[in-house]
Image (cartoon, coloured by chain):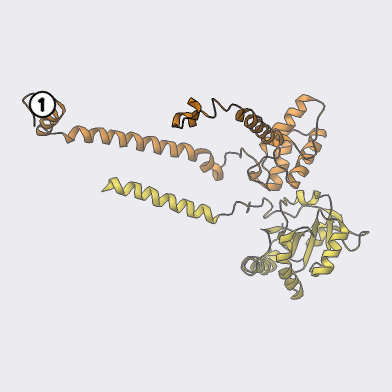
Amino acid sequence: MMFRQVNPAMKLSRWTGSERSHRPRIFPCLLLLVVATCLPVHAADTPLKFDDPAQELRYQSLLSELRCLVCQNQSLADSHADLAQDLREEVHGMMAQGKGNDEILAFMVQRYGDFVLYRPPVRSGTWILWFGPFVLLLIAVTAAVRFSRGRNRGTAQVLSEAERDRLQKLLLPPTDGNS
Amino acid sequence: MSRYLIPLLVFIALVGLFAIGLRMDPRRVPSPFIGKPAPAFDLPQLHAPGQRLTQEILRGRPVLLNVWASWCVECRHEHGLLLQLARQQQVPIYGLNYKDPRADALRWLEEFGNPYVISAVDEEGGVGIDYGVYGVPETFVVDAAGIIRYKHIGALTEKAVNETILPLLNSGKGSSERSGP
């Protein structure tokens, strides 16, 4: 008979308590969703493999260093764009020919510019990219320090003798009667 | 009043930065080919599969090299402009038919008109990679010495043709005679 009672606590406990049957249905769905969104991350459209695990590792790390120019926020490893597939084949082919990482990256830069690299070289043109965040951090820290110092000094100066007395009176419980 | 002035200045600076950022198009990646010779290629011609087309054809006078495909919707938007340029004989236009089955390409040109002196067939897209093509259409301005002067990404617009490409072609005519590496 307690269950028929309408009270807010009961409503809250519905999902955890009496009607347990809801949970098992939702949880597998969520799990499926999570798994489904994780799977395609490294699924190249036509997987190109190396027999040698070290080569495979090198191949994957090269691909993750290179930007896909079609979907610019994806690496060649992640992108499903047609061009990404072609470039994966290109990288695969060059590695099979025994070309080194530097050669392969140079091949890409020659065609697509530094933009194709997720870690562009430090040059005068990329200084703002490499050092800008540190400059901003420095400015932010300086500003924060100055701001907090200024505030502390400000509060210290605010209270005069008379004000302090008044504060004491307000804070301390009245000793002589009311009012 | 610097208490209010500094945040205001920071805010204005940020708005300025964002305004600049919004005007920049991340798709326009500067081409590393500007000022460099057009990369070599050797491809079959679209209308005469037995004959080849090489980068040599781009030399001698300023030309446009237009990367196109029948599956490319944007290409239709610029097609009228290309036809107009070809009709007015302002500049010879060569086509690079990118990753396109020959039959589709031929049918497309029949339907919409053919602005190209010759189109080369890059069915595998390998020459596209050598030219740093990462989307169709793209248009290269190649000067008389075979040097790439400009690359337009996306469909050509009247503005781009009149303000950038035609002036470049006209200046190229003069300078290419003087220079020559």
* SS of the residue under disc 1: loop
The residue nearer to you, when weighing B123 against B52, is: B123
- Residue lying at the far front of the rendered structure: A1
In the rendered structure, the answer to whether residue A60 lies left or right of residue A145 reads: right
Hey, which quadrant is residue A164 in on the image? top left
The residue nearer to you, when weighing A55 against B64, is: A55
The residue nearer to you, when weighing B161 against B59, is: B161
Report which residue position mark 1 lands on: A174
For the point 82% across and 59% down, the residue is B56
The residue nearer to you, when weighing B78 against B142, is: B78
Rendered view: A5 above or below B56? above
For the point 86% across and 63% down, the residue is B106
Q: Which quarter of the image is occupied by the C terminus of chain B? A: bottom right
Chain coloured yellow here: B
Percent x, y for residue B138?
71, 58
In the rendered structure, the answer to whether residue B52 lies left or right of residue A159 reads: right
Percent x, y for residue A20?
59, 26
In the rendered structure, the answer to whether residue B124 lies left or right of residue A105 reads: right
Q: Amino acid at mark 1?
A: Pro
Percent x, y for residue B61?
75, 66
Chain coloured orange here: A
